[in-house]
Image: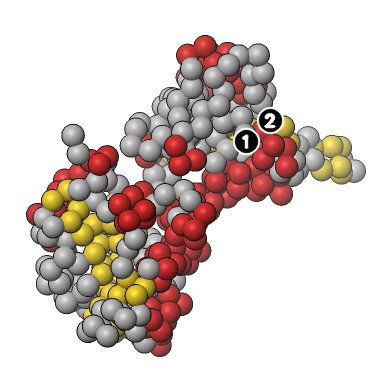
């Protein structure tokens, strides 16, 4: 057995970030593996977790220097390098690191001799599903988007038969049927809306139907596949994009609620809805742009604001999961635990990564940036 490994949990500093990277549940589990855990005071406050809850789970709660002597630092978003003074040489930073948007921070980790592991680069393979932060957080984001849209919509979602007359069901259209989109479909259906959905991947048609929604796809033009490597969406052929845009335009004009979820890793979000399409919608309709932080799927959407254009409310949170901090933290922290525990070497008393997952998520090592997507 090597010496006891120390795991540090820091309070998130990013604006609007209310999640935390470990909960009392995962702290207890890490201690069960033989680690010691230090938690920065108030790290869980915005996720409704008190310092005493961490203490009861066996963690040391520190007002300063929580990262000192740490072998592994956990984060929801990557901590700035200046918060990491005193960590062990070669310490792991395990968090969502936004490698393309925050390359400066990745370089700072390399310069500090840290090993940065970007959880959002986790490969989409069966054994890594329980470690996938994008899926766990997108699931909650898809749910929250519908709830927010329903709240802003000036009418009811379900059809209601009343003595005073009938209320028609809202029509909800989900654009992009990944994890967030599937949850949005399910949530809108549960609330009683008439739901339709579209995606660039033909394989999603059955998924849409299985949730009781109507698929909206161009049938006559090639180029629908859109399936990139690792289960991510890619861009479509030009001819298909044109035909799909015409079909979607006609469909959007009849919708009350539109949720857009399309993201391409490392690129600006694709534009799905134009100003002209917004103008075609009925006044009082609501659009929720889940991609607003990556440039937005919707023309004119503004991060963390509700803007009104042509009588249509357009909303997007730059960090939607942070609006459900308790559940989002519980799932995120389990992703981190599932990841580290899967590679835990009992002899060494610490995690040892294999090549497949290690190479997929490791950004920096030995003072250098080493990930192929960040080189060249």
Q: Quadrant of the C terminus?
A: top left
In the displayed structure, would residue 145 be above or below residue 311?
below
Q: Quadrant of the N terminus?
A: bottom left
Q: Mark 2 and 1 residues: CB-CB less than 8 Å, in contact? A: yes
Q: Is residue 94 left or right of residue 272?
A: left
Cα distance in 3D space between marks 2 and 1 = 9 Å
Residue name at image x 24 percent, y 57 percent? 116
Q: Position of residue 303 (x, y in %)?
A: 38, 39
Mark 1: few, some, or many residues within 10 Å (few <14, many ≥20)? Answer: some
Which badge, 2 or 1, comes first in the chain's sequence? 1
* Quarter holding residue 245: top right
Q: Position of residue 262 (x, y in %)?
A: 48, 34
In the image, which disc is placed on residue 215? 2
Residue occupied by mark 1: 204
Question: Which element carries disc 2, helix, strand or loop?
Answer: strand
Question: Which element carries disc 1, helix, strand or loop?
Answer: helix
Q: Nearer the viewer, residue 144 or 315?
A: 144
């Amino acid at each position: 057995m090597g010496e006891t490994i120390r795991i540090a949990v820091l309070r998130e500093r990013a604006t609007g970030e209310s999640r935390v990277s470990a909960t009392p549940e995962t702290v207890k589990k890490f201690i069960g593996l033989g680690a010691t855990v230090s938690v920065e005071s108030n790290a869980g406050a915005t996720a409704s977790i008190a310092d005493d809850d961490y203490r009861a789970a066996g963690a040391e709660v520190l007002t300063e220097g929580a990262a000192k002597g740490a072998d592994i630092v956990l984060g929801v978003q990557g901590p700035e390098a200046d918060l990491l003074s005193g960590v062990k040489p070669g310490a792991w930073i395990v968090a969502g690191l936004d490698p393309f948007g925050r390359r400066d921070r990745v370089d700072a980790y390399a310069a500090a001799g840290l090993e940065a592991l970007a959880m959002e680069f986790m490969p989409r393979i069966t054994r890594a599903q329980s470690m996938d932060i994008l899926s766990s957080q997108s699931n909650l984001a898809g749910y929250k988007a519908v709830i927010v849209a329903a709240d802003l919509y000036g009418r009811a979602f379900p059809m209601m038969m009343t003595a005073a007359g009938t209320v028609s069901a809202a029509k909800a259209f989900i654009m992009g049927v990944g994890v967030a989109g599937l949850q949005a479909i399910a949530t809108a259906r549960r609330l009683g809306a008439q739901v339709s959905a579209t995606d660039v991947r033909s394989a999603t048609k059955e998924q849409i139907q299985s949730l009781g929604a109507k698929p909206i796809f161009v049938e006559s033009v090639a180029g629908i596949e859109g399936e990139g490597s690792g289960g991510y969406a890619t861009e479509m052929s030009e001819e298909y994009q044109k035909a799909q845009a015409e079909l979607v335009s006609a469909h959007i004009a009849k919708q009350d609620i539109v949720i857009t979820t399309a993201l391409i890793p490392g690129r600006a979000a694709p534009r799905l809805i134009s100003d002209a399409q917004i103008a075609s919608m009925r006044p009082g309709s609501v659009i929720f742009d889940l991609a607003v932080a990556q440039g937005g799927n919707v023309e004119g959407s503004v991060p963390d604001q509700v803007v009104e254009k042509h009588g249509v409310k357009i909303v997007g949170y730059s960090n939607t999961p942070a609006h459900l901090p308790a559940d989002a933290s519980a799932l995120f922290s389990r992703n981190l635990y599932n990841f580290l525990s899967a590679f835990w070497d009992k002899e060494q008393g610490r995690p040892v990564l294999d090549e497949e997952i290690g190479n997929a998520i490791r950004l920096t090592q030995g003072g250098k940036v080493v990930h192929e997507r960040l080189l060249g």
